[in-house]
Amino acid sequence: MKTILSLLAVAVIGLACSSEPDITPAMLDGGALFDPSLYQPENYLVSRAIPNPTPEQARRPVIIACHGYTATTFEWDEFRAWAGGRTDFYLSQVLLGGHGRNYAEFKQSTWRDWQAAITEEYDRLEKAGYQNISLVGSSTSGALLLELVASGYFANRPAPRNLLLVDPIVLPSNKTLSLVKVLGPMLGYVESDQSAGEDQYYYRFRPQETLQELQRLLNVVRKALQKGVTLPRNCVLKVYKSKQDSSADPVSAVLIHRGVRTAEGGRIDVELVDSDIHVYTRLKLREVVTAKDQANQTATFTDIATRVLR
Amino acid sequence: MNTVPNRRMPPKKNWFEKSTVLFVGFLFAPLVITPSFGQDRPAGAVLDVGIRLQKSVNLYAENGFTAQYTSQKLASQRLYVGLSYVTSRLGTALGSNAIRQDNLLVSAAYYFRPKGLIRPVVRANLGYFSADLGDDIFDALPNASLLASPEVGLCFCPDIPLKINASVGYNVLTGNGTTGPGTLYPVFVQTSITWNVLKKPKN
């Protein structure tokens, strides 16, 4: 009887597990399209473009812009376009580990792999002599950057001047993510509702393994915020958060506001943005973009540049 | 193409994993125990008063107080009506930066196998949730909600006025980034430990 029940349980689990997703070559997941920063890193990373800066170049502010879960460097392309030919700061667009490649590589990656791409660029810039580095992160990169601060990554190296987080996630809007450890193995993967255009820049299929990694990261960051996180000296943090957000629950901003203090013990800055878009600074390929959305994007880009140049 | 080193964290012992295993063990192991020495149903009314320990899966621990009442008129003491209050102030938010949030619940519970040591229980909760988001800048965010949650579990009822009740609950209403408080999570586990304060001591 026991054996029969065991076999039945295995059969039910087996039937419940989904097969591999139906990936086409037109999708980023498919292994035919790759993030362009993999081919031409010098167009995206300042450490590759100017590995040996002059003293004047080394003093110029560098913004390392990091994207969110399943995204690519595309997420910050509009910031580069907005900056145009500006020469008063540099922009480094980092591709997170496991991202921008293919479904199999994404499936195998951990949140530590995602984060490693950020620290590698930071280390390269620091070793090259750049003295004024700021970090900008959207969505999951917000959590990755907070974890770097909480874990003491900046304790023994020059700290960034600014940490600027656009729609950082600490708690997901879709609370089903909290059950991914149980439901994930039965589902196999989750398909996101995005356009064919977005399929070229964002993974369409989210392997449950990576969703579990995301939940692990969020738990680490949430618990660190509960204990309290102190910013390095001379580093400021600002959160830009959409009031309505179907991916990163807006209450994430509350948790960061409660959990992070400046080195002097002060509160961090939070701006609630009147938007219902997750990562409202990326408007390309959105189905509907209003004048207000564009105004929000411009205001935030302007504020980021102003803070970095302060 | 992947130049990222595969740095993996050593697996950390997860408190929740361990507690879940213990909880599930407590919940289901007694089903195989012959319930031959459970408490007899008292003839009069029952008022169980005690503590309720609750944990949302992947979020806060919220603890507080609970009370439930039954009498012969309520389905021969199978049906209980109750009132509970749990708060993160007595849980995760105690001495931490976690959000202070309160849950007030009224409930109706039905106990099966009323003479058994282990009694399956189903419970329906209705209530009110409120979170203190702290700063005025967050006034635009939802911080309150109605609560509606079914629970299923087991009660350990020995031959003394003690009841230990463990169950899994599901919040039907949760936050979703647009409506509802963001710290209202769907699945929770709870344990309540109560004492029947109306049972008179034997002479």
Image (cartoon, coloured by chain):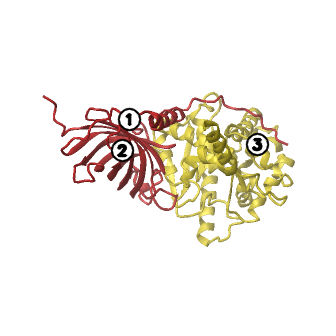
Left or right of B143? Residue A104 is right
Q: Which residue is mark 3?
A: A57
* Mark 1 closeness class: few <14, some 14–19, many ≥20 residues within 10 Å: some
* Mark 3 vs mark 1, CA separation in Å: 79 Å
Image quadrant of residue A266? Answer: top left
* Mark 2 closeness class: few <14, some 14–19, many ≥20 residues within 10 Å: few
Residue A308, image x and y in percent? 63, 48
Provide the letter of the chain coloured red: B
SS assignment at label 1: loop
Quick check: can you spot residue A230? yes
* Dot label at residue A140: none
How many marks are shown on the rendered structure?
3
Quick check: can you spot residue A40? no
Left or right of B95? Residue A286 is right
Q: CB of mark 3 within 8 Å of CB of mark 2?
A: no
* Mark 1 vs mark 2, CA separation in Å: 9 Å
For chain A, the rendered hue is yellow
SS assignment at label 2: loop
Question: Which chain hosts label 2?
Answer: B
Q: Earlier in the sequence, mark 1 or mark 2?
A: 1
* Mark 3 vs mark 2, CA separation in Å: 79 Å
Q: Amino acid at mark 1?
A: Pro
Q: Which residue is mark 1?
A: B35
Q: Amino acid at mark 2?
A: Arg
